[in-house]
Amino acid sequence: MHISNVNNNYRVNWVTQSIELLRSKTVRANPTLFDIGAGMQPYRKIAQDAGFVYKSHDFTQYDPKNNENKSVGIHTIGWTYPKQDVVCDILEIPTDEKFDLVICTEVLEHVPDPVSSLKKLFALAAEGGHVLITVPFGSMTHQA
């Protein structure tokens, strides 16, 4: 097995176990989870199965059939990309809503100002809430 697959599997397992653990520590009846830079929303079902109300964010709403933006990159026309609840730059996310758990996986290596982005993540967490962050040791081409 390729080392990147091992790292990916380890990360997914760790994040999954962390979501489940943090759900067990959340006393609210309908705890909320905000997935920052959610992309394909790999943690939506895991979060919902654990009992979280899931909300997603990404910097854009990718539509592979929309040729208006003429985006450059490796895209697949048949790719089903989920709708994001909040679409904006990470620093522009409104902080009026607070969340029991904020997750941000494999995103901070892409932002121009990671320190301000970290501050934003913590501003989104409710009092007593948690923030879960992962970043890669090495970043390979995404979505290839």
Image (tube, grey):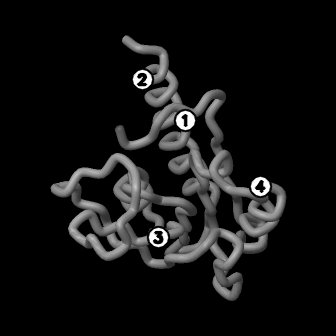
Task: Evaluate whether residue 50 shows in this view.
Answer: no
**Neighbours of disc 1 within 10 Å: few (<14), some (14-19), many (20+):** few
Closer to the chain start, of discs 1 and 2, is: 2
Closer to the chain start, of discs 4 and 3, is: 3
Q: Relative to residue 26, is residue 74 drawn left or right?
A: left
Nearer to us of marks 1 and 4 is 4
Q: In the rendered structure, which amino acid carries the disc numbered 2?
A: Asn
Is disc 2 placed on a helix, strand or loop?
A: helix
Q: In the rendered structure, which amino acid carries the disc numbered 1?
A: Trp
User: Which residue ends up furthest to the left in the rendered image?
Assistant: 78
The residue that mark 4 highlights is 114
Rendered location of residue 58, percent (x, y): 50, 67
62 relative to 19, above or below: below
Q: Quadrant of the N terminus?
A: top left
Rendered location of residue 30, percent (x, y): 50, 75
Is disc 1 placed on a helix, strand or loop?
A: helix
Q: Relative to residue 79, is residue 27 drawn left or right?
A: right
103 relative to 88, above or below: above
User: Which residue ends up furthest to the bottom in the rendered image?
Assistant: 96
Closer to the chain start, of discs 1 and 4, is: 1
Rendered location of residue 144, percent (x, y): 35, 38
Q: Nearer the viewer, residue 85 or 66?
A: 66
The residue that mark 3 highlights is 60
Real-space Cα separation, disc 1 to disc 3, in angstroms: 27 Å
Nearer to us of marks 3 and 2 is 3
Real-space Cα separation, disc 1 to disc 4, in angstroms: 22 Å
The residue that mark 1 highlights is 14
Nearer to us of marks 2 and 4 is 4
Is disc 3 placed on a helix, strand or loop?
A: loop
Q: Nearer the viewer, residue 86 or 129?
A: 86
Task: Evaluate whether residue 132 shows in this view.
Answer: yes
24 relative to 141, above or below: below
